[in-house]
Image: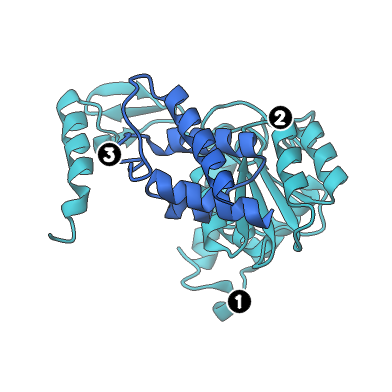
Amino acid sequence: MGLLDKFAPLAEQYRRHEAAGTNPFTVAFDRVLSPTEAMIGDKRILLLGTNNYLGLTYDPSVIDSAIAATRSSGSGTTGSRIANGSYGGHRSLERALADFYGRKHGMVFSTGYQANLGIISTLAGKNDHLLLDADSHASIYDGARLGYAQVTRFRHNSPEDLANRLRRLKDEPGDKVIVVEGIYSMLGDKAPLREFAAVKREYGAYLVVDEAHSLGVLGETGRGLTE
Amino acid sequence: MSEQVSDIRDVIFGTLRAMLPDGRPITEQTHITEDLGLDSVAMMDFVMEIEDKLDISVPLDKIAEVETLGDLIATVQRLKVTS
């Protein structure tokens, strides 16, 4: 048995997708034209799967600011904040985002995936409990695995099932941290947040809402589902 | 205690029989993913049904350790005793 033998079923799937022309790993653009279009060879295609909801990647002021920041600060921070200090621009961005949301603090991560790893594994400690919606994004499950809290899933978008599970945990020590998404990345539906918040209050738990797909999309002023 | 184990076995086997259309034989040695071909989503649905019926929550790390139906019965029984 070799190290890679266990991937044989996966390799077979890969070959089947390759043969059917449905292998997502081989999609490569020769040129990206806009937030919504790209070229593969001489074929013009629509970008329907991106998270670029606000289309800011080609906004002229965003591009100008990115160029100016690269000229003044270089093309990378080249190390972690704890070892090398924070850049002023990152601090200002965090302050601006916190103000936008009306919160005391903000922290930026390089990707949404890393934000969930960092926040979820830190907030719920060894003797705490994480309650995840069953249809949560993989980064939420991975963040839960990285920490030391006990992890329980509840039925997707079911405040009743969440309440049941909190009831079963009510005599257990430790904080209970519920994680839901504003808009579910896999399904496109919204969490019944008002009902979840009522259950949270009833059991004295905490609620984390991942607004990665709802910022700028939901809420009267685009602050997400919580608004 | 042994009666409780048989109750748990009945619930688990009954839930599984309702999920599997072909009525294939299942025992405590049956491997849930290899023998029954349950993928991770079907496995989650299966465990959630059992959780509802027995009024327990099986933590994710405990589900990850389960390979056979016998493992699942033992895990559920331990959770029932401590709940």
Can you tell which of label 2 and label 1 is closer to the viewer?
2
Q: Circle 1 sits in a helix, a strand or a loop, which is it?
A: loop
The x and y percentages for residue A71 are 50, 62
Q: Colour of chain A?
A: cyan
Alpha carbon distance from label 2 to label 3: 32 Å
Q: Is mark 3 on a helix, strand or loop?
A: helix
Say which quarter of the image contains residue A39.
top left
In the displayed structure, would residue A40 be above or below residue A101? above
Residue A199 image point, x, y percent: 81, 39
Decide: few, some or many residues near mark 2? Use Cα within 10 Å; few <14, some 14-19, many ≥20. Answer: some
Mark 3, residues whose alpha carbon is within 10 Å: few (<14), some, or many (≥20)?
A: few
Q: Residue at x 23, y 42 (%)?
A: A10
Q: How many numbered callouts?
A: 3
Q: Are marks 2 and 3 in contact (CB under 8 Å)?
A: no
Residue A25 has which mark? 3
Q: Is residue A227 above or below residue B64?
A: above
Q: Residue furthest right?
A: A202
Subunit of mark 1?
Answer: A
Question: Front-most of B1 and A199?
Answer: B1
Of label 2 and label 3, which has the lower sequence position? 3
Res. B43 image quadrant: top left
Q: What residue type is labelled 3?
A: Phe
Q: What residue type is labelled 2?
A: Leu
The residue carrying mark 2 is: A218
Q: The disc numbered 3 marks a residue on which chain?
A: A
Q: In this view, does A116 lie to the left or right of A197?
A: left
What is the drawing colour of chain B?
blue
Does dot 2 land on a helix, a strand or a loop? Answer: loop
Please name whichever residue, A35 or A212, is drawn nearer the observer in this view of the structure: A212
**On the image, numbered disc 1 is attached to which residue?**
A85
